[in-house]
Structures are given as structure tokens and as C-alpha cells.
Image (spheres, grey):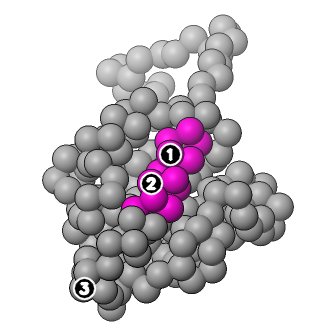
Amino acid sequence: MVISSTNSYSESNVDVVKINTDNKINLKKFTQTGQIQIYHSSYRGSYSSIIRDSLRNAALGRKVLLIQFMKGGVKQGVANSVKLCGNLTWVRSSHSFDQHNYEEIENNKNLKKSIFESTYELWNFCKKELLSGENDQIILDEIFLAIQMKIINKDDLISTLENRFITGDVILTGTDIPKDLLLMANQITELRS
């Protein structure tokens, strides 16, 4: 409930400090610091809301980079990225593979090498983008699976995040998240079915 009165409270209360409003307020412009956000889920394929939000952000004029590390099937690669809404760059692995069949990947040396090379190519591209400061938002989808498969080094990811150009947000998604990265996050969201 709000109660208003025509009486001035400050005039009747001697404990209130008078503020001089004659001086102009000096406003300082500051740059926004980007956040590290982690989206965690107990199952894969639960990040459609993040992709939806990235499309909305791009349509609103933010420059967005979406990297899907462990998604194959479209043979994109860094050289064949897709532009959506003018501001969203979407990149997947240059190698086509079914990431759900780990046994097949482990037993096929050529397949494993190709997956590792194309995923590492994406990671090197991401590192450059994280350090460039050219994106308002970078989404590293399934990066924790790439760490779990020992394609990307966890310490390399941590170092890159610590040295990134910090005005843009970085969103990391995955199922098994290393504790070191959880401690770096400004926001952790658990997605449930």
C-alpha cells in the first residue's frame, strides 16, 4: 500500500540530509562488460531456445556468432558459414558425422582424425573471434562435449575466456561442465525437460 501526503516529510524530520541540487550531475559513459553464461542440460539437443534467442538478437541488430562444435551433417566449416538475419553467422563442422555414435568414432581412426581436425579448426576460429571484440554475442554450442572428447583443451578455453574482448556475451552449452568453468560464469542456467 502506498500512502501519499501533501506534507513534506523532510521539513518535519530533522534527521533528513538536505541535498544541494544546484550543481549539475556529471554522468560518465562506461562500456558494458560482457558476461559468460552457461546453459547446462542433462540431455543433448535441448538448446533450441538459445538458438531462437540468437536469431532474435541478430534481427535486433546485434552481431551474433553461433558455433555448433559437435554437430555434423551439413559440411559447413569456417569457409562455408551461413549468414542469417544479416547479423548471425552460423558455423558447423566441415566434416559430416553422427556425434551420437561414439563407438564408431573411436573404432574408425580416419573418422576420428577428421572429426578432431574439423572441430579444432572451429576452435581456432572461435579463439580469434573471442579476442577480436567484433561480436556482441558468441555462442559455443556443445563445447563441453568437445572438451570431454579431448579435442579442445579445457585450460585453453579458460585462458581464451579470461583474455577475451569483454564487451560481448559468451554463451557456453553442454552436459558435463568442468568445475573451473562453472566458477567463471556470471550466469548458470539449468535446462530441464
Residue 2 is covered by the magenta coloring: no
Inspect the image, locate mark 2, and give the three-letter code of the amino acid beneath it. Answer: Tyr
In the image, 122: left or right of 70? right
Q: Which residue is mark 2?
A: 120
In three-dimensional space, the C-alpha distance between marks 1 and 3, rounded to whole angstroms, equals 26 Å
Point 34% across, 35% down: residue: 159
Inspect the image, locate mark 1, and give the three-letter code of the amino acid beneath it. Answer: Asn
**Magenta: predominant secondary structure element?**
helix
Q: Quadrant of residue 162?
A: top left
User: Which quarter shows the C terminus?
Assistant: bottom left
Locate residue 3, reporting x and y percent. Answer: 46, 57
Q: Secondary structure at mark 3?
A: helix
Mark linked to residue 124: 1
Q: Which residue is mark 3?
A: 103
The answer to whether any part of residue 156 appears in the image is yes
The crowd level at tag 1 (other Cα within 10 Å; few <14, some 14-19, many 20+) is few
The answer to whether any part of residue 58 appears in the image is no
Locate residue 187, reporting x and y percent. Answer: 35, 55
Residue most extreme to the top: 23
Whichever of callouts 3 and 2 sits on the residue coming sooner in the sequence is: 3
Compared with 147, 41 (above or below) is below
Query: Are dots 1 and 3 in contact, CB under 8 Å?
Result: no
Q: Secondary structure at mark 2?
A: helix
Point 34% across, 63% down: residue: 146
